[in-house]
Image: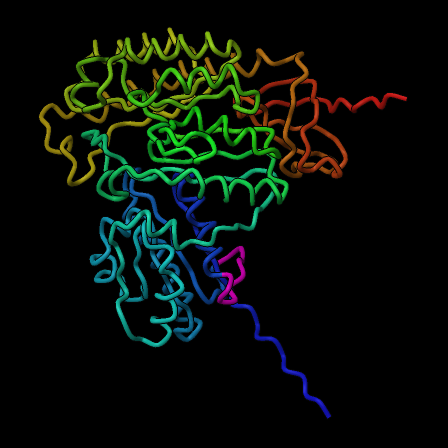
Amino acid sequence: MTTQTSRPEPKRLFIKTYGCQMNVYDSERMRDVLRPLGYQPVDTADNADLVVLNTCHIREKATEKVYSELGQIKKLKEAAGGKMTIAVAGCVAQAEGAEIMRRQPAVDLVLGPQAYHKLPEMVARASRAVGERLETEFETLEKFDALPKAREADGPTAFLSVQEGCDKFCTFCVVPYTRGAELSRPVDDITLEARSLAAQGVREVTLLGQNVNAWHGAAPKLEGGEEWGLGKLARHLARIGGFDRIRYTTSHPRDMDDDLIAAHAEVPQLMPFLHLPVQSGSDRILKAMNRGHTAEHYLDIMRKMRDARPDMALASDFIVGFPGESDQDFEDTMSLVREVGYAIAYSFKYSARPGTPAADMFGHVPEEVKDERLQRLQALLRDQQASFNASKIGETIPVLVTGKGRNPGQLHGRSPWMQAVHFDAPESLMGQIVDVKVAGATLNSLAGEYVAAVEVA
């Protein structure tokens, strides 16, 4: 007589991700390292065995939002009789690790962005109530070496981290303190992960980094072994096969070299979309921000990009009301926006980040002035975005189908210029690139009609 051993029930993992695409990638990798321990992702924190908050420190009041969320999760942990592990990861964890554990004793683990490969070990130690529960050391290369080389793709698009950290030290930004110095992953490691994604049907890959165009690395020996920049890496990934689209984000003007610009003209897979934050159009404010570029340098990059790809869609970030910003400084920003013409942009009022040089600067702008300037800037940016989207009406464009729409029979996808596109078509097209004739446009999306491929007899 034989006895059957039942397989253990999978453990439930809930990860809430805040902020940038890098955090989305990091959350995916945390799922990868926890999968061998039997953790399966779930959609809510209710009844989860492990809850991870992957935090972002960029936006205003980010820390207080984390504590508010932890208060709600603490109640779930109490309702479960304490049988829930709570972890705080990401940039808030890096910046305020010990304080998090002091203010919220329900937290079991705190780990910074460079420690995700240690998560299984930390979870195991927490379950035994032994060992260190706080890990915020900077060990970026060790992290990438220790993470699984293969990944489980989720759909036709994927992020691929190639660079971490920042050496720019903009006076308003906490990233150098929470993510560490700039480090680039080796070409061979990137290639191995890219091949794994392509083999699983990923059609569009987005290369990630805090300053992704600062990436550099030694080429494979078969390629001559010389130093590569991001342009050569894009060419290399395009030759792998499988990827129809390659993107990268986020870039810095100081690292936008001519070879990367030329790659946009030479590599069909490199999409005609560039997110290049400028923050201000005033040279005086750019200097105070320690951006390391001028408005004219930025505009020169924009002109070169459009020469390389006339259909290029441009995106940017703006901060209004930086300490010392005068009316003329703000008008310089408005002039730059009018000259460039953006497809999409993100704009915010300056808010002080403790520990950054700008927080101690003189000349902080009154809130009502920041509000008025932000409203004017956003009105101009909305007009430009609406005009760009409307310019696609009547065109037939390639759309990568990424999911179902809200209505029955509807699909949605992404244009080469990052617009969301909605259209009616069969679900069998999921994951494919199809032609859609654009019939309408709103501020945030396009709507169109699927153009079925005609079979040649």
Relative placement, left or right, of 97 versus 299 is left
Q: Residue furthest bottom?
A: 1
Q: Position of residue 177 (x, y in %)?
A: 22, 42
**Image quadrant of residue 5?**
bottom right
Q: Please say if 107 is above or below 326.
A: below
Q: Quick one: quadrant of the C terminus? A: top right
Q: Position of residue 252 (x, y in %)?
A: 32, 25
**Image quadrant of residue 452?**
top right
Q: Position of residue 423 (x, y in %)?
A: 69, 28
Is residue 36 found inside the magenta-colored segment of the image?
A: yes
Q: Please say if 401 is above or below 192.
A: above
Relative placement, left or right, of 301 versus 344 is left
Q: Position of residue 157 (x, y in %)?
A: 56, 38
The part of the chain drawn in magenta is 35-44
416 vs 321, nearest the viewer: 416
Q: Residue furthest right?
A: 457
Q: Please say if 271 is above or below 356.
A: above
Residue at 33% of width from left, 44% of height from top? Answer: 56
Residue at 32% of width from left, 63% of height from top? Answer: 109
